[in-house]
Image: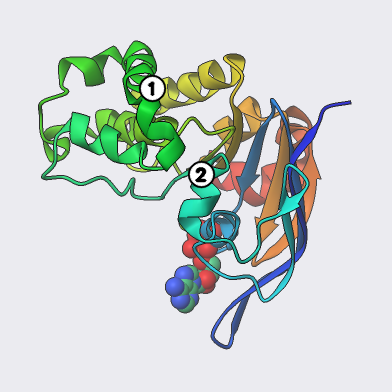
Amino acid sequence: MAKRLLEIRSLDVHYGDAHVLFDVDLHVDEGAIVSLVGANGAGKSTLLKAVSGLVAPTDGEIRFRDRSIVGMAAQEIVGIGISHVPEGRGLFAQMTVLENLELGAYPSRQRPRMGESLARVFGLFPRLDERRGQKAGSLSGGEQQMLAIGRAMMANPSLLILDEPSLGLSPIIVRTMFELVRTLNEQGMTILLVEQNIHQALQVAHHAYVLQTGHVVMQGSGPVLLEDPTVRKAYIGSLA
Ligand SMILES: Nc1ncnc2c1ncn2[C@@H]1O[C@H](COP(=O)(O)OP(=O)(O)O)[C@@H](O)[C@H]1O
Ligand SMILES: [Mg+2]
């Protein structure tokens, strides 16, 4: 049986008085691509932020490699192997590609391996290598997303969390992005993917969850959910 890398149990999150995640259970097995899909405002980013220590849950448990990570500082969570590529990418536009990548290697145990990590990222993204001296803000949307993912890879994560990587990209670049997700996974990376682009997110996923106003309303294998009439009607039908 696959090893459980991430396990979320009965998670609740509030922003002040606003209750946004309700009793959420979710798990990610080692080697899997798990997609979390749902409408805008459903709580997808909030769930990812809870995992990476950017918001504090009000109840429930989050375990990574069977160790509780609730209450750990965000940098500490990066240090134990969880890298989060935020919605909107969070790049430093005035800094170069190389400088942005170097920032991704800030966990102290990664610094001695910087050269090795850079070589790996540039191998994966030759375009970033060609543009290593360019300012991040001058890159195309697709290149910026690659840079954001490359920066996350600099910390040598064992779980990569991607928040809407396809947002704002043209259809052809969206396809490239999903191919990249698959390639990273084939190379051994475990991925937790959040998407509004439900069709492709379900296609690529081994397992998927549907989040609706803070509740997990459905889960199953990606391809099975893709064929589910309720999912089709609620999400895909409306987008077709
Ligand atoms: N920092 C915040 N403070 C207060 N409310 C927030 C904050 N961030 C998100 N929300 C609210 O929480 C809900 C879930 O948001 P979010 O997790 O961003 O959803 P999604 O990523 O699925 O679009 C929304 O109603 C949103 O308005
Ligand atoms: Mg979001």
Q: Position of residue 183 (x, y in %)?
A: 52, 16
Amino acid found under the numbered disc labelled 2: Gly
Position of the N terminus, as image quadrant, is top right
Q: Position of residue 207 (x, y in %)?
A: 74, 35
Identify the residue at the far right of this view. 1
* Residue 212 visible somewhere in the drawing: yes
In front: 208, or 137? 137
In front: 230, or 188? 188
Left or right of 115, for residue 78 = right
Q: Which residue is mark 1?
A: 117
Distance from label 1 to label 2 (Cα)? 15 Å
- Tell me which numbered mark, 1 or 2, is placed earlier along the sequence: 2
Considering only vertical position in the picture, is 170 above or below 210?
above
Numbered mark located on residue 53 in the image:
none
Left or right of 198, for residue 59 = right
Considering only vertical position in the picture, is 70 above or below 226?
below
Identify which residue is drawn at 53% across, 58% down.
Answer: 49
* Residue 165 visible somewhere in the drawing: no
Q: Is the distance from the Cβ of mark 2 to the nearest ligand 1 atom less than 8 Å?
A: no
Identify which residue is drawn at 55% across, 20% down.
Answer: 182
Quarter of the rendering containing residue 42: bottom right
Q: Position of residue 232 (x, y in %)?
A: 69, 42
Q: Which residue is mark 2?
A: 79
Asked if the residue at tag 2 contacts the one at tag 1, i.e. Cβ–Cβ closer than 8 Å, the answer is no
Amino acid found under the numbered disc labelled 1: Ser
Q: Position of residue 2 (x, y in %)?
A: 83, 27
Other-residue count near label 1 (Cα within 10 Å), few / some / many at <14 / 14–19 / ≥20: many
Identify which residue is drawn at 14% across, 41% down.
Answer: 95
